[in-house]
Image: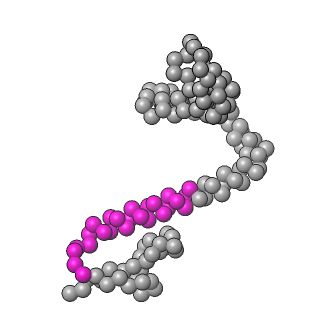
C-alpha cells in the first residue's frame, strides 16, 4: 500500500486497506479533526441530527449548570482572549448592518447629478456606527 498525506497533520501514512478513501491518519488529533468536519457537514444537511444535537446539549447544560462558570474561572487567559474576540465580532456585525442600511438607502435615490460633500457638512447614521466609513451627503442638483 502506498503512503498518502494526512488531510490534517500533512504527515505521510499508510492507509488501512479496509477503509475506503481514508484521508486522515490514526493520530487522535487527526481523527478528532475528521469527526469535527463530518459533524459540521452533518449539521448542515440533516435537520433531525441538528435538532437531536441541540436537545442533547441543552440536557447536558441543565445537568451541569456550573460547568462553564467554573471553566472560565480556571482559564482566565482564554476567557480574556475570547472576550476581546467577541467584541471584535460584535464590531464586525455592527459594521455589516451599517453597510446593509446604506444599500437600502441607495435604492431610494433617483438617478441624476449629485454633489458629494464630505462631513461635517452632511450627516449620516452610519457615522455613529463606524468612524472609518467615508461619510457623504447626496444633494440632487437641478
Ligand atoms: Zn494526521
Q: Residue 51, percent across and down?
A: 48, 30
Task: From this view, report whether residue 19 is shown above or below residue 137.
Answer: above
Task: From this view, report whether residue 107 is shown above or below residue 40.
Answer: below
Seen as rendered, the residue at the extreme front is 2
Q: Residue 126, percent across and down?
A: 44, 71
Asked if residue 77 lies left or right of residue 13, the reply is right
Q: Is residue 111 magenta?
A: yes
Asked if residue 103 lies left or right of residue 43, the reply is left
For the N terminus, the quadrant is: top right
Main secondary-structure element of the magenta-colored stretch? helix
Residue visible at 46% across and 85% down? 120
Q: Which quadrant of the figure has residue 141?
A: bottom left
| Nearest the eye: 28 or 86 | 28
| Nearest the eye: 128 or 102 | 102
For the C terminus, the quadrant is: bottom left
Q: Which residues are magenta?
A: 89-113
Residue visible at 69% across and 53% down? 81
Residue visible at 51% across and 73% down? 132
The reply to whether residue 5 is in sight is yes
Residue visible at 61% across and 30% down? 6
Q: Residue 92, percent across and down?
A: 52, 59
The reply to whether residue 63 is in sight is no
Q: Is residue 142 magenta?
A: no
Seen as rendered, the residue at the extreme top is 18
Q: Residue 24, percent across and down?
A: 60, 27
Asked if residue 131 lies left or right of residue 68, the reply is left
Q: Which quadrant of the figure has residue 135?
A: bottom left
| Nearest the eye: 101 or 23 | 23
How many discs appear?
A: 0
Q: According to the image, what is the colour scheme of the structure?
A: one colour
Amino acid at each position: 500500500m502506498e503512503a498518502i498525506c494526512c488531510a490534517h497533520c500533512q504527515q505521510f501514512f499508510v492507509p488501512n486497506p479496509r477503509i475506503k478513501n481514508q484521508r486522515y491518519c490514526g493520530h487522535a488529533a487527526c481523527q478528532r479533526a475528521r469527526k469535527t468536519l463530518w459533524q459540521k457537514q452533518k449539521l448542515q444537511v440533516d435537520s433531525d441530527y441538528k435538532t437531536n444535537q441541540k436537545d442533547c446539549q441543552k440536557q447536558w447544560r441543565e445537568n451541569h449548570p456550573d460547568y462553564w462558570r467554573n471553566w472560565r474561572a480556571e482559564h482566565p487567559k482564554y476567557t480574556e482572549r475570547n472576550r476581546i474576540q467577541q467584541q471584535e465580532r460584535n464590531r464586525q456585525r455592527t459594521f455589516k448592518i451599517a453597510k446593509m442600511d446604506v444599500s437600502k438607502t441607495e435604492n431610494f435615490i433617483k438617478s441624476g447629478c449629485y454633489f458629494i460633500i464630505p462631513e461635517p457638512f452632511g450627516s449620516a447614521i452610519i457615522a455613529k456606527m463606524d468612524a472609518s466609513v467615508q461619510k457623504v451627503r447626496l444633494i440632487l442638483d437641478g
